[in-house]
Image: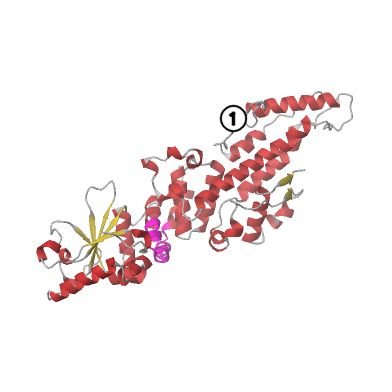
Amino acid sequence: MTKDPSVPWNNARNVDLAPDDEDDHRQDSKTPVVNIAECGDLILSTRTGSETAAVLFRVDSHRLKARSAFFRALLESSFREGVSVRDVHEKIRQDGAEPASAPAAWLPQIDLEELGSHAMTDLLRILHGQDMSYHRPGVRHLAGLATLADQYDCLPEVAEFVHQKNFLLTLNKKSKGSSGAEVSEEHLRQKILVGWLLDYPQWLTSCSQRLIVRGSSRWVDDDVLGEAKQGVWWDLPHDLEAELQARRELILETVNSLVVDFLGPYTSKQRQCSLGYSNSAECDSFQLGEAIRFLSRIGTVQVQGLIYDTHVGEPTARSISEIISTLRQVPSYQIDQHHSHCGLRTKLTPPLQFLQFVLDYGVGVCRDCWKHDRPNSRWSNAAAAGKWTMPHVWSDWFPTGRPRSCKEHEAKIKALFTASARQWA
């Protein structure tokens, strides 16, 4: 059937009408039906690519309309699906029965495709005021449930149920008590999705921060997304995917600019060694050579000719914390015993410590800011913030170690990483 494009989500593919021939419109009585509502008046059919047979659910259309804007628009409107369901109900009444008490084979059916039947079962149970079939759902199941709730416009109802059951709090406590093994990227992405859709801010903030710092295979090469990476969390909705990638790239650009800002002056005519010894010029040359050798060895600087440039660099896939930690290992190179405070180590250590402090403090997405103040919270496509100067005392930047407000925190972090120029010393 040709579906009206104005129906939300475009999921309801087909509604079976009741023709005059009774045997034609009734379903195969052998097809198993999951009774979400014993007195339901509608059949929903779901199928995924991994399932060979459809799964049928008997549901109460009145409950669905009351708790899901999608089903309300679908069933109450003048769209073909809603009209068809009402026609079938009227046909059943003309046959002397009520839809709520009629056999499942008599009821109208709506086909919903590309959905996981397990998550759909729990979504329908929640919308009918019932407990989930999973008493201790994992993060993956909750991510699938949240995706369906977003798709069928019933997030508040599902979020309220999940919070009442303390599912997220229980999972959070369990993860804190784990052995500390490395969490997979997919697990982080699932928690980001759940944190955003089901209103659990700490998961969104902490896991988005970890993904930004660690990096994603999704951002390195889109071709890595095979069949095993087809969940919604591999392309986070509501602009989150682009925002997390943009934040990582801006942080990487900041770290890169820090190295260039301190290395560049050694290539100028201005003397960097301020001790005034007869070998100060030699000290600058020595420091430049040792710095380039160290930075090349750790993979943060590449010596390359510009006469014919054949290489276009891509952002590194390494962890940002790992890069900062490696840079902090730069030795205290000395041309002799009198030049103990010359070189990159003395200059790089304070700003690197500050950057690590900022990363630890938080570069993740704040749910409240992203929901209510997205234009100001967004880093991607943000206008350059002008020149930024590193504070001499960190407590001056964050009084008492914490910002006065979330917006103040967001503004300070964003100003650092979107600055057009930075003064590190």
Residue under circle 1?
A: 311
Q: In the rendered view of the protein, which quadrant contains the N terminus?
A: bottom left
Residue 413: say if magenta: no
Depicted 187 relative to depicted 92: above or below? above
Q: Position of residue 337 (x, y in %)?
A: 82, 25
Which residue is drawn at the image coordinates 34% and 64% (left, top)?
A: 126
Q: Main secondary structure of the magenta part?
A: helix
Q: Position of residue 206 (x, y in %)?
A: 54, 51
Which residue is drawn at the image coordinates 46% and 40% (left, top)?
A: 222
- Is 33 displayed left or right of 64 in the figure? left
Who is closer to the viewer here, 214 or 13?
13
- Is 413 displayed left or right of 271 in the figure? left
Who is closer to the viewer here, 368 or 85?
85
Residue 161: say if magenta: yes
Which amino acid is tagged 1? His
**Quarter residue 227 falls in:** top left
At mark 1, the secondary structure is loop
- Is 396 displayed left or right of 180 in the figure? right
The range drawn in magenta is 146-167
Depicted 50 relative to depicted 149: above or below? above
Would you call the spot at circle 1 few (<14 residues within 10 Å), some (14-19), or many (20 or more)? Answer: few
Which residue is drawn at the image coordinates 44% and 38% (left, top)?
A: 223
Q: In the rendered view of the protein, which quadrant contains the C terminus?
A: top right
User: Does residue 333 appear anywhere in the picture?
Assistant: no
